[in-house]
Every structure is written in C-alpha cells, then in structure tokens.
C-alpha cells in the first residue's frame, strides 16, 4: 500500500480521535495509532491542528463567548465547549489543596462543584439555579487527575431542564449526576 494512502488513513483517524476527545495528548495519539511522537507532530502540522494547550485555549475562548448563565470565573474548571441548551464540556486539573486532609483523594465537593456549575452553564438563560440533584460517586479522584465533565441537556418543560453530567478521569467514569435546573425570568 502506498505511503500516501497510509498517511491519509492515519490523518482521518487522528481527526476522528480528536473529535471524540479533543484533550488527547500527542503521546496518547501516538500510542493509539502505533506511530512515533514525531510522526504525530508532523501529521498535526500538516493537518493544521495545534498542540493540546493551544486547542484548549481556543476551545475555551469559543465556549466562553456563548456563556450566559454564569460569569466565566464562576464556572468551576475550564469551560472548553458549549452548545447552549444541548451540551457542554469542562476540565478541572486537581491540586493538593483540593484533597481531604492527610490524603491524596480529591474532596467530593470539588467534583460536585464542577458538575453543578456545568449543569447551570449549559442553559441559555440569565438566571439559572439548581433545584435538585441526584448524584453518585463511582470511584475516587486523586490529586493530579484531570477531571473531564460532560453535561447533556435532556428534556425540559417550561423553565425546568434535566441535565446529566458525567465526569471521567482517563476515560473512567468517576461521577454521575442528574440535575434539575431552573431558568428564572428575573432574579428576586
């Protein structure tokens, strides 16, 4: 098979993998495709795909421009993607000050805060509050983990929305939340 055909197939796989998970590192792409790190970097350059840090910056700028229900600094984590009233994506890099005392485990309220702020952020309204939440912590997160939370808007009636949030670390689901959020017409 000609080298150009292999390259084209690899390029298509790179694009597909990054559509599915825009936070993949060059190392992860190289492992997934069975090629060297320098090959991935060359392929990214040929495809015009920036490195991870630049991709995240661009995604954050675009998502922030669509944010209505919260100020950017009120979102826990970094908002990377936002399709109002449909879905949103954020990441939270965990640090030592998020851990339970004398442990390496991230305190649950940080995971919850990321999820609930994302559930509010995904709704396109000026004032949104959490009315109720049904949450489940599946496995603990550790200091240094990158929490990737994805919110998806389900059904809604009038001003009430059901938003599900799933948080993963390295592809493993650690948290699931189902939130009922309410869009208020005005702030009392």
Image (tube, grey):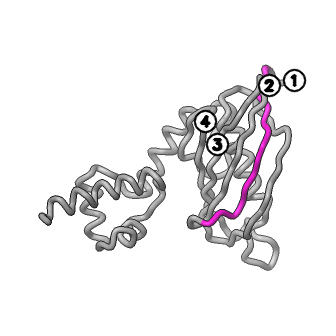
The residue indicated by pointer 4 is: 86
Q: Which residue corresponds to the image point at 29% horizontal and 73% vertical from the top-left?
A: 36
Mark 2 → mark 4, Cα distance in angstroms = 18 Å
* Mark 4 or 1, closer to the camera: 4
Q: Which residue corresponds to the image point at 47% horizontal and 53% vertical from the top-left?
A: 20
Q: Secondary structure at mark 1?
A: loop
Q: Secondary structure at mark 3?
A: strand
Magenta-drawn segment: 172-185
The residue indicated by pointer 3 is: 152
Instruction: Determine contact: label 3, label 4, CB under 8 Å.
Output: yes
Q: Position of residue 125 (x, y in %)?
A: 69, 26
Q: Secondary structure at mark 2?
A: strand
Instruction: Determine contact: label 2, label 4, CB under 8 Å.
Output: no
In which quarter of the view is residue 71 placed?
A: top right
Whichever of labels 2 and 4 marks the residue nearer the N terminus, that label is 4
Whichever of labels 1 and 3 marks the residue nearer the N terminus, that label is 3
Q: Residues within 10 Å of mark 3 (few under 14, many from 20)?
A: many
Q: Position of residue 19 (x, y in %)?
A: 43, 50
Whichever of labels 3 and 4 marks the residue nearer the N terminus, that label is 4
Q: Residues within 10 Å of mark 1 (few under 14, many from 20)?
A: few
* Mark 3 or 2, closer to the camera: 3
Mark 4 → mark 1, Cα distance in angstroms = 27 Å
Locate the N terminus by quadrant: bottom left
The residue indicated by pointer 2 is: 184
The residue indicated by pointer 1 is: 188
Lateral position of residue 41 relative to residue 1, left or right = right
Rendered position, 156 above or below 138: above
Task: Count the numbered circles shown.
Answer: 4
Q: Nearer the viewer, residue 136 or 73?
A: 136
Lateral position of residue 37 relative to residue 78, left or right = left
Mark 3 → mark 2, Cα distance in angstroms = 20 Å
Q: Secondary structure at mark 4?
A: loop
């Amino acid at each position: 098979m000609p080298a150009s055909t292999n390259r084209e197939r690899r390029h298509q796989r790179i694009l597909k993998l990054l559509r599915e998970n825009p936070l993949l590192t060059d190392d992860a792409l190289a492992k997934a495709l069975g090629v060297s790190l320098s090959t991935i970097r060359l392929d990214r350059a040929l495809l015009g795909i920036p490195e991870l840090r630049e991709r995240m910056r661009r995604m954050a700028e675009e998502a922030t421009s669509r944010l209505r229900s919260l100020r950017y600094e009120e979102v826990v984590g970094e908002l990377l993607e936002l399709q109002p009233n449909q879905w949103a994506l954020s990441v939270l890099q965990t640090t030592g000050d998020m851990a339970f005392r004398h442990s390496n485990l991230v305190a649950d309220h940080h995971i919850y805060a990321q999820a609930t702020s994302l559930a509010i952020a995904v709704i396109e309204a000026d004032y949104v509050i959490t009315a109720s939440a049904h949450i489940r912590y599946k496995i603990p997160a550790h200091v240094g983990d990158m929490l990737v939370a994805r919110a998806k808007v389900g059904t809604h009636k009038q001003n009430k929305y059901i938003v599900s949030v799933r948080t993963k670390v390295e592809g493993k689901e650690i948290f699931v939340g189902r939130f009922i959020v309410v869009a208020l017409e005005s702030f009392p």
